[in-house]
Amino acid sequence: LVTAGPTNEYIDPVRFITNKSSGKQGYELAKSLFKKGFDTTLISGPTNLEITKDINLIKVETADEMFEATKKSLPADVAIFSAAVADYKVKNIANDKIKKNDELTINLEKNIDILNYVSNHNSKRPKLVIGFAAETINLDKNSKDKLISKNCDWLITNNVSQKDIGFNSDFNEVFIHYKDKKFKKEKLLFKRKSEISEEIVDRIITQIN
Ligand code: PMT
């Protein structure tokens, strides 16, 4: 199971809050898993990407929809959460297009954390739960904190303050923290997202065998 892409959180019928995720990293992970023989489900927020029909693609738009699709897709042996899920949604979505005023106040409320839900869902918890972290500062500390607080087995971090990697690039540079190796850190140097994905999937195969 792989989540990918951004989510759209509606303000009114024609406007939404989103982020810069293109879905490329998640789609490459799904392709690499499928190539290595995994029965693969890709739950994707809105992207312009295409993928082979052999991969079970579930298209969603909001974090709530991604959450429902994820729950329906369990159990899974391995789950990778590469989606950039919006942390907040609009509290009261306007039924009609909001009229222009001098100021506009939008109240937000927290979205459910999909990764957190799955990693703590005892009966259906995948054997291997892999989170991603998009960070700009304190990468090491924030990654370890996220690995623990989200109960992941691995946490893959990218520095999204660098323009040539991370969001909406064909390239990435990530490091992996492993819980079972006492938070040992391994760095995958600047590479195409397809190559990073292949390397991650090779590590998954070693881990689960
Ligand atoms: O899509 P691309 O353009 O290829 O870019 C790839 C990427 C930069 C989006 C990807 O590599 C990445 O870092 N994805 C995670 C982005 C993110 O939202 O990170 P986060 O640190 O805010 O969230 C931590 C983890 O919790 C992530 O695994 C995220 O999927 C998950 N999460 C977060 C919030 C939420 N409500 N539910 C979640 O499941």
Image: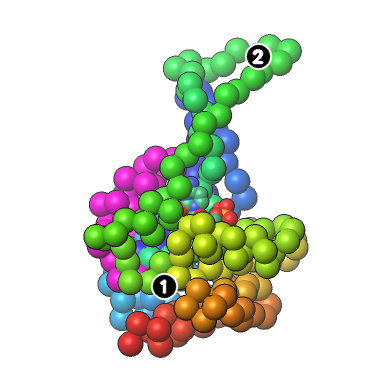
- Amino acid type assigned to the residue bearing label 2 in the image: Lys
Q: Secondary structure at mark 1?
A: helix
- Which residue is drawn at the image coordinates 31% and 63% (left, top)? 125
Q: Is residue 60 left or right of residue 146?
A: left
Observer able to see residue 168: no
Residue extent of the magenta highlight: 52-78
- Which residue is drawn at the image coordinates 40% and 84% (left, top)? 207
User: Which corner quadrant holds the C terminus?
Assistant: bottom left
In this rendering, the answer to whether 81 lies above or below 113 is: below
User: Which corner quadrant holds the N terminus?
Assistant: bottom left
Q: Whole-percent x and y of residue 79?
A: 38, 65
Q: Whole-percent x and y of residue 153?
A: 45, 70
Q: Is residue 69 left or right of residue 176?
A: left
Residue tagged 2: 100
- Label located before the other in sequence (2 or 1): 1
- Which residue is drawn at the image coordinates 50% and 74% (left, top)? 179
Residue 31, labelled with which disc? 1
- Amino acid type assigned to the residue bearing label 1 in the image: Lys
Observer able to see residue 11: yes
How dense is the environment of label 2, judged by Cα within 10 Å: few (below 14), some, or many (20 and up)? few
Q: Secondary structure at mark 2?
A: loop
Q: Is mark 1 within 8 Å of ligand 1?
A: no
Q: Whole-percent x and y of residue 89?
A: 51, 34
In this rendering, the answer to whether 28 lies above or below 69 is: below
Q: Is residue 76 magenta?
A: yes
The CA distance from mark 2 to mark 1 is 44 Å
How dense is the environment of label 1, judged by Cα within 10 Å: few (below 14), some, or many (20 and up)? many
Please say which color scheme the image uses.
rainbow
In front: 125, or 89?
A: 125
Residue 146, labelled with which disc? none
Q: Whole-percent x and y of residue 164?
A: 73, 66
Quadrant where ligand 1 appears: bottom right
